Amino acid sequence: NGKTIVITGASSGIGEATAAKFAGEGANVVLAARRKDRLEELQNSLQDKPGKVEIKQTDVTSKDEVHELIQFTVDTFGGVDVLFNNAGLMPLSFMEKGKVDEWEKMVDVNIKGVLYGIHAVLPHMQEQNSGHIITTSSIAGHEIMPSGAVYCGTKFAARVIMEGLGKELAGTDIRTTSISPGVVDTELTETITDEDVLEMFEKNFGKGKMTPLDSKDIAEAVYYTVQQPKNVDVNEIIVRPNNQG
Ligand code: NJP
């Protein structure tokens, strides 16, 4: 479709599937994450797609690296049409465990990473008077679960930041969207270190308990928001497996 999209958290899961979808539809795609090997693998696997795919290793907790990512995209493709702020971590834990390092990481990636993305891309979008900023929030940005106090806090924050940004940008041609998935089959739970949470997860979401979404389901939702006519601003999409309560 000729648009240029920057995707953070593109090395796996939802970001990877969204990259494949957009490259397949002919978009220019810039893949960003910390694991360069995974980005290279993905870039190679997308070689035959109609869209051009570039990679830029980026840690979204670094304001400078996020600015470099956006500048790289502008230099390479002449602008940024869509920023997909999707990088995230979910080391759930019960607060009494005091896993303060994990709380800090979630604040750094899930909130500050989103803010750095907005900070870096907004001036470019304002200059071109068009653009679309999309952020992955979560069902956890609507409903709080035990062990999710901090994760849910960061996802509520991401959603509220996007809503506030959307209100400021009303009347411009820059659109804002939060994507709130339910359970999606990705590597996200691999960051959980609290044994009690892992046990709880197995009990509630383990094999046969529910069918999680596929990352492709979320990629389709992201693509839908971008494909809307100029005057249509899809501010939020909630997608969950039909057997997730
Ligand atoms: O998980 P996963 P998802 N700088 O682990 C990247 C939200 N969500 O696709 O840096 C840059 O496969 C990491 O890359 P790397 C969730 O909260 C999910 O599910 O190479 N990137 C990887 O590409 C998150 O916001 C579910 O390690 C960093 C990516 O983030 C988004 O969906 C439900 C980074 C994580 O990919 C994508 O997660 C829901 C950093 N500092 C919301 N740290 C779900 N799966 O059920 C991490 O409601 N990344």
Image (spheres, rainbow, N blue to C red):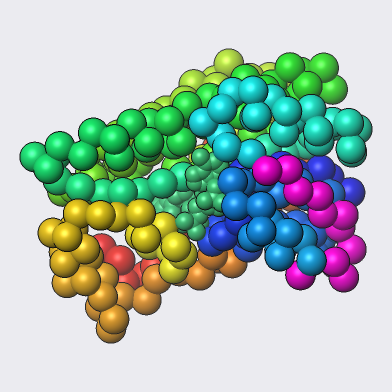
Instruction: Pick the residue in front: 61 or 81.
Output: 61
Instruction: Pick the residue in front: 47 or 82.
Output: 47
Asked if residue 81 lies left or right of residue 238, the reply is: right
* Residue displayed at 59% across by 46% down: 34
Q: Is 230 located above or below residue 240 in the figure?
A: above
> In the rendering, at what x and y percent does residue 20 appear?
71, 63
Residue pushed farthest left?
Answer: 96
> In the rendering, at what x and y percent does residue 27 appear?
83, 52
* Residue displayed at 69% across by 25% down: 67
> In the rendering, at what x and y percent does residue 1 appear?
86, 53
> In the rendering, at what x and y percent does residue 219 appear?
61, 59
Q: Is 198 located above or below residue 236 in the figure?
A: below
Instruction: Pick the residue in front: 238 or 77.
Output: 77
* Residue displayed at 64% across by 39% down: 58
> Which region is colored magenta?
45-57
Which quadrant of the figure contains the C terminus?
bottom left
Is residue 120 covered in magenta?
no
Please tell me in which quadrant of the rendered image residue 210 appears: bottom left
Q: Is there any visible trace of residue 107 in the rendered image? A: yes
Q: Is 57 located above or below residue 199 in the figure?
A: above
Instruction: Pick the residue in front: 85 or 32.
Output: 32
Q: Is there any visible trace of residue 233 in the rendered image? A: no
Q: How many marks?
A: 0
* Residue displayed at 72% across by 33% down: 69
Residue pushed farthest front?
Answer: 37
